[in-house]
Image: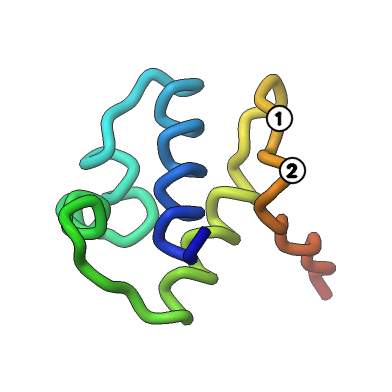
Amino acid sequence: MNMIDKLLTLCSGYCESRKIVFPTLSTLIFNSGTTLSRLQNGGSITVRNYEHAVEWLSDHWPEDQQWPDYIERPKERVEG
């Protein structure tokens, strides 16, 4: 599973749990409502943007939703 597939899997789970659509989540993560749709249609993303998105999702992941076991979750950052 490549990084885009992993990201789209996480985004689908998040959207389903929060009852929102991809453009809304795309705006929250990337400040652009079209980024996730572009990825669904074969677009690419930088590693830096992928890491940013996965960190955002990890930080905002619904407590009642299990993070997929086959996708590595970022370590919690210690502030300070």
CA gap, disc 2 to disc 1?
Answer: 8 Å
At x 67% / y 40%, what residue is drawn?
68
- Quick one: 64 or 41, which is closer to the camera? 41
Residue 46 percent coordinates (x, y) = 37, 80
Three-letter residue code for mark 1:
Gln
In the rendered image of this protein, does residue 49 appear above or below residue 24? below
At x 64% / y 50%, what residue is drawn?
59
Badges 2 and 1: C-beta atoms under 8 Å apart? yes
Q: Secondary structure at mark 2?
A: loop
At x 79% / y 63%, what residue is drawn?
75
In the rendered image of this protein, does residue 3 appear above or below residue 7? below
At x 27% / y 72%, what residue is drawn?
44
| Other-residue count near label 1 (Cα within 10 Å), few / some / many at <14 / 14–19 / ≥20 | few
- Residue 52 in the figure: left or right of residue 29: right
Q: Which residue is mark 1?
A: 66
Tell me how the rendering is colored.
Answer: rainbow
Q: Which mark is residue 75?
A: none
In the rendered image of this protein, does residue 69 appear above or below residue 75? above
Residue 63 percent coordinates (x, y) = 71, 27
Q: Which mark is residue 69?
A: 2
Residue 51 percent coordinates (x, y) = 54, 71
Q: Secondary structure at mark 1?
A: loop
Residue 66 found in image quarter: top right
Residue positioned most to the front = 1
In the rendered image of this protein, does residue 30 appear above or below residue 51? above
- Residue 50 in the figure: left or right of residue 76: left
| Other-residue count near label 2 (Cα within 10 Å), few / some / many at <14 / 14–19 / ≥20 | few
Three-letter residue code for mark 2:
Asp
